[in-house]
Image (spheres, rainbow, N blue to C red):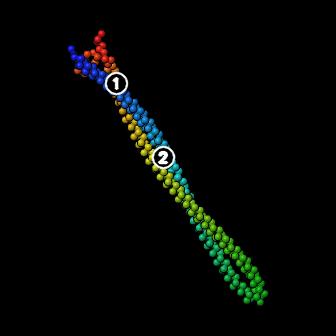
Amino acid sequence: MASASETDQSYSYGYDYCDEAEDAKAKAEHEAAKAEHEAEDAKAKAEDAKHEAEDAKHEAEDAKHEAEDAKHEAEDAKHEAEDAKHEAEDAKHEAEDAKHEAEDAKAKHEDAKAKHEHEDAKAKHEHEDAKAKHEHEDAKAKHEHEDAKAKHEHEDAKAKAEDAKAKAEDAKAKAEDAKAKAEDAKAKAEDAKAKAEDAKAKAEDAKAKAEDAKAKAEDAKAKAEDAKAKAEDAKAKAEDCDKNNGDHDHDHDGKDNGDHDHDGKDKGDK
């Protein structure tokens, strides 16, 4: 039969064992709750990161569309500038033609004037003759008419050349404006393209962040599951300890230690 000191020692060990089981149960439940909370936080962070990645993706798509629109606008402006340039060149050629026409009219007028002066001089020398005088008058009238006509043609050609020159200047100015507009549109397209690239990079970063957050959430979830399983084991162990309160092998030597329970009374004693 075991002595009193041996019984007390086994009894005390039984208490310690069950207390440790209860402590382990509480600690495991706390760890499980903590891990579950961390898993929820990680899941929420992963969702936020996912939404952020989706927003960044949409922003990148919008920036891409904006860059494409700006590119098309730059191309249109370039074509407009080319058309204006061609129009300016045509106006320049037209002005040159008008200038040449005016120069021809001027030369024609000068030739006619010289011819008329010669004929007038000849007629003047023959003025004593009635016929010569009459011819002189007719020639003079004819010459005056032709001079007036040539002068009028010269004036018209000169005015036409001036108009063509003004038109060429306007076309040139229009071409310069179109060129400047094309350059601005090109710069805008480049800026939009850079913005699209930045948005794309941001979307990629957000996507990677979301993937990391998702992985972290999965790890936290697994940790929570492990902690929960550990808590369940500790709970089962504690319940087993409570059920076997009076007949427990407290020192784990395969022998009954005196049928002690945790209230300090031997359940086998009447």
Choose between 175 and 120: the one closer to the eye: 175
Q: Which residue carries the number 1 mark? A: 22
Most extreme residue toward the left is 1
The image shows residue 103 at horizontal and vertical percentages of 63, 75
The image shows residue 113 at horizontal and vertical percentages of 68, 81
Instruction: Report, in whole angstroms, how far the alpha carbon at label 1 lies from the one at label 2.
Output: 56 Å
Give whichever of discs 1 and 2 has the lower sequence position. 1
Q: Which residue carries the number 2 mark? A: 60
Q: Amino acid at mark 2?
A: Ala
Is residue 20 depicted above or below 176 in this figure? above
Q: How many discs mark residues in the rendered view?
A: 2
Residue at position x 61%, y 73% from top?
Answer: 100
Residue 105's mark?
Answer: none
Q: Amino acid at mark 1?
A: Glu
The image shows residue 188 at horizontal and vertical percentages of 52, 55
Choose between 146 and 162: the one closer to the eye: 162
Q: Residues within 10 Å of mark 2 (few under 14, many from 20)?
A: many
Residue at position x 31%, y 25% from top?
Answer: 20
Looking at the rendered image, the quarter that the C terminus falls into is top left
**From where the camera sits, is residue 183 visible?**
yes
Most extreme residue toward the front is 4
**From where the camera sits, is residue 83 visible?**
no
Callout 1–callout 2 Cβ contact below 8 Å: no
